Image (spheres, rainbow, N blue to C red):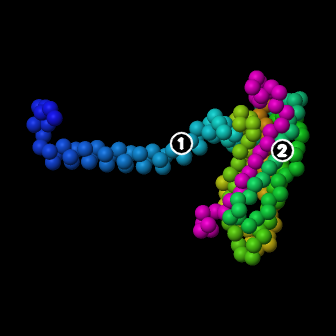
Amino acid sequence: MADTAASRSMPSGNRNKGVALALGVLAVGMVGLAFAAVPLYQMFCSVTGYGGTTQVAEANPKGVIAREMTVRFDSNVDKTLPWTVKPASPITDKIGTVDTVTYVATNNSDKPITGQAIFNVAPDLAGVYFNKIECFCFTEQTLQPGETVEMPIVFFVDPDLADDRDLATVKDITLSYTFYASDSEGS
């Protein structure tokens, strides 16, 4: 092994401490990035509509255009959640129209159960144009034994969709929810 000036000037114990410190800082940094990855990804998706992430709005300031769009609704329930969820019926309306639809959820168990929903829009590119004014997503819902609740969604499709050449032939958008037991349920 070659004897270098640096290795002669630093005692072996100090080199090991320096390497250990550098690796410790690297490990802490990687853990920090792992925790920051989810919120950063969610922020990126909400800004760009990437992955079918929808937008949040208070109203539709752009008006209604003549082009019609059918919005279909889907629901999936994780096997750990003893609920039945019936999605809303499809709706066809002019782009820009503010519509309200309702999902219906029933707790099929004999105890109170808390659940949540995550959503996705297909095609993915349409997510940036799908605006929710009111939605139950990301809000924990506690249903009592046998209870049935209506969960409304108020939304509109942004008229700017008509200017997106990649969506020129799209006539249908699907809003899909996956329901799962809340972490507070201990599942």
- Front label number (1 vs 2): 2
Q: Residue furthest front?
A: 1
Tell me if residue 180 comes above or below residue 57 in the rendering: below
Q: Residue furthest bottom?
A: 110
Q: Is residue 40 magenta?
A: no
Instruction: Tell which circle, 1 or 2, labels the residue nearer the N-terminal end.
Output: 1
Tell me if residue 39 comes above or below residue 142 in the rendering: above
Of 182 and 46, the residue lying toward us: 182
Q: Which residue is identified by label 2?
A: 72
For the magenta stretch, what is the residue range?
160-187
Q: How many marks?
A: 2
At horizontal 12% and vertical 33% (from top left) the residue drawn is: 3
Of 186 and 2, the residue lying toward us: 2
Tag 2: residue type? Arg
Distance from label 1 to label 2 (Cα)?
A: 29 Å
Q: Is residue 182 magenta?
A: yes
Q: Is residue 5 left or right of residue 160?
A: left
Q: Quadrant of the C terminus?
A: bottom right
Residue 6 position in % (x across, y down): 14, 34
At horizontal 53% and vertical 42% (from top left) the residue drawn is: 40
Crowding at dot 2, Cα within 10 Å, few <14 / some 14-19 / many 20+, comes out as some
Of 26 and 130, the residue lying toward us: 26
The kind of secondary structure element at disc 2 is: strand
Q: Which residue is identified by label 1?
A: 40
Crowding at dot 1, Cα within 10 Å, few <14 / some 14-19 / many 20+, comes out as few
Residue 136 position in % (x across, y down): 72, 55
Residue 44 position in % (x across, y down): 58, 38
At horizontal 83% and vertical 41% (from top left) the residue drawn is: 71
Tag 1: residue type? Leu
Tell me if residue 167 comes above or below residue 22 in the rendering: above
At horizontal 86% and vertical 39% (from top left) the residue drawn is: 70
Residue 152 position in % (x across, y down): 80, 54
